[in-house]
Image (cartoon, rainbow, N blue to C red):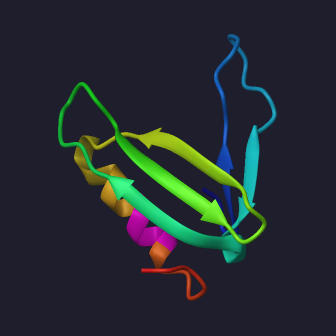
Amino acid sequence: MNERFVLRYCWSTAEWAEPETIISLDEITDLSVNYNSSFFEDSMVFVSTASGIETTFPISSEHGLDKKFVEALQFEPSLPE
């Protein structure tokens, strides 16, 4: 996540590729999270946009990073809580 977009990368080689999905924060219409406190499994974030994009991606629950990420997204005035 940067200041205005959620960027989703797919790891396919030893080098980072271009983002697979770029979503403007003001396009997000639905945001939900399946939190997982397990050290071995990540939480899953589900995002839908006004233009019909739907994407899911994992985010680490280590040190509460999943909750911090979602809180940062929901801080945006245009996002659903």
Q: Does residue 72 show up magenta in the picture? A: yes
Q: Farthest residue toward the front?
A: 52
Q: What's drawn in magenta, residue-wise?
A: 69-73
Locate residue 76 relative to residue 20 in the image: left or right.
left
Q: Nearer the viewer, residue 45 or 59?
A: 45
At x 42%, y 62%, the residue is 32
Q: Where the N terminus falls, by quadrant?
A: bottom right
Count of marks overlaid on the render: 0
Q: Quadrant of residue 21?
A: top right
At x 75%, y 52%, the residue is 22
Q: Quadrant of residue 43?
A: top left
Locate residue 68 relative to residue 58 in the image: left or right.
left
Q: Image height check: is 44 above or below 48?
A: above
At x 56%, y 88%, the residue is 77
Residue 42 image point, x, y percent: 33, 36
Q: Where the C terminus falls, by quadrant?
A: bottom left
Q: Farthest residue toward the bottom?
A: 77
Q: Image height check: is 30 above or below 47?
A: below
Q: Nearer the viewer, residue 29 or 69?
A: 29
Q: Quadrant of residue 12?
A: top right
Q: Does residue 50 show up magenta in the picture? A: no
Locate residue 30 relative to residue 49 in the image: left or right.
left
Residue 60 image point, x, y percent: 36, 40
Residue 33 image point, x, y percent: 37, 56
At x 68%, y 11%, the residue is 14
Q: Image height check: is 14 above or below 43?
A: above
Residue 79 image point, x, y percent: 55, 79
- Dominant SS in magenta: helix
Locate residue 55 relative to residue 75 in the image: left or right.
right
Q: Farthest residue toward the left?
A: 38
